[in-house]
Amino acid sequence: MTKVSKPPAMSLPEEGLRRIPLRPVQDERERLFHAIAPGYATPMTGPPSPRCDIAIVGGGLAGGLAALALAAKRPDLDVRLVEAGAVGGNHIWSFFDGDIAKRDRWLVAPLVRHHWPAYDVRFPGHARTLRMGYKSITGEALAEAVAAALPAGHLIADRALHVAPDHVLLAAGGRLDARHVIDARGAGNASALICGWQAFVGQALTVRGGHGLARPVVMDATVEQADGYRFAYLLPLDAETIFIEDTCYGDSPDLDVAAARARIRAYAEAQGWKVKKAVAREETGVLPVVIAGDFDRYWPRSDRTARIGVRAGAFHATTGYSLPDAVRTASDLPGLIGPDLPALLRDRAAASWRRQRFYRMLGAMLFRAAEPDERYRIFERFYRLPSGLIARFYAGRSRRGDKLRLLVGRPPVPIGRAVAALRRFDWR
């Protein structure tokens, strides 16, 4: 496991803080909690009641991180997490060091399972190594940390049938009342968005004799371009284990898993890798790449239930990645708890939607101006730009100069088609 730095000390709000006497760490579950919240006691345990302070619905990335942050910074609150399946699911989430502000790294540092100092990209006419730190966390790491942080009975293995601002109706027949319900169940009203799609299938394979890769390949676009911008994504998890993801920026959310598996096998064979038959893990997904939409339809003002994560529209419009937003929101969440929580979270999400107008414009050019098998040229040109610009782009913090640099010069798509694509949508 990659060594990570010790999280910095944190301060807690004094008002209403219930002091809990510290006692020695008793087991692995408590050790994990102390890694997330150094210096604080293990949360009190006891029979859970049908009422709590915070009910988080959805144990994916956003919901799991929110539970960890609240357990660490607000141990005075009774927090429940409602998730029918495994917390974190069967996922690997990766991020660039620049995606996470220093003040927020305490939250994800204990979850990191792999770390590399650089990564590669490959295109038909360009290859490059970028000296940027790249890290990965797993669903299993998130699940272990959440189990350690929440008291017994506060992780509710059930499905929510109905979610309201102050209560959740459970499939098993119970009702959980809360001061605040936070909806973190994934995508909201997709009909409010105009999207392209990033569809992927990833498999962890064991290579006899080793795969020989020292660092990730975030994009290998030297593969055949069909039905969209297609590339292989490679994570060397150890000397013999390689995670290969077949990814396509396409026009449809449909995912042909069998075809993707065949492409992964063909890619491994083309590298000369002798792969064992067993697949260590498999992950599938379809991420929205937002071109345009109506935020007020996606999260209506009339909906007073707090939202976080993809449910709040908090993801990068061009890449579909939600980890940087999930970390920022979870880290800030303990300080937002109060009667205005739903309004504060909606205001944050609406502000993020406005800031991402430029990224939606790029999505329009990608999906409406470029031919599917020519879309790779946009990314090939992008990866010729300065590394700082690339880092800020992925973090969703592009500067005005970055945006101009992305647009000036010889365009990778026909100018007439780019102008026509931009005129089709409302960019408010």
Image: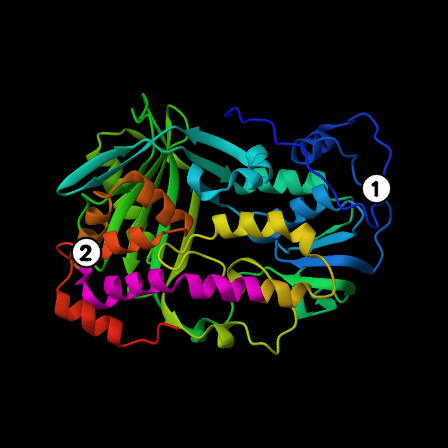
Is 132 colored magenta in this rendering?
no
Crowd class of label 1 (few under 14; some 14 to 19; many from 20; radius 10 Å):
few
Tell me: residue 161, above or below residue 69. below
Position of the C terminus by quadrant: bottom left
- Tag on residue 408? 2
Q: What residue type is labelled 2?
A: Val
Which residue shows up at 32% across the image and 23% down it?
210
* Residue 309 image offset from top left, x and y in percent: 54, 57
- In percent of the image, x 76 and y 50: which residue is there? 154
Q: In which quarter of the image is residue 267?
A: top left
Picture coordinates of residue 420 (x, y %)? 20, 74
Kind of residue at disc 1: Met
Q: Name the residue under label 1.
A: 44
Residue 96 visible, this orientation: no
From the image, give the main secondary structure of the stretch colored magenta: helix
Classify mark 2: helix, strand or loop: loop
Cα distance between the residues tagged 1 and 2: 58 Å
N-terminal label among 1 and 2: 1
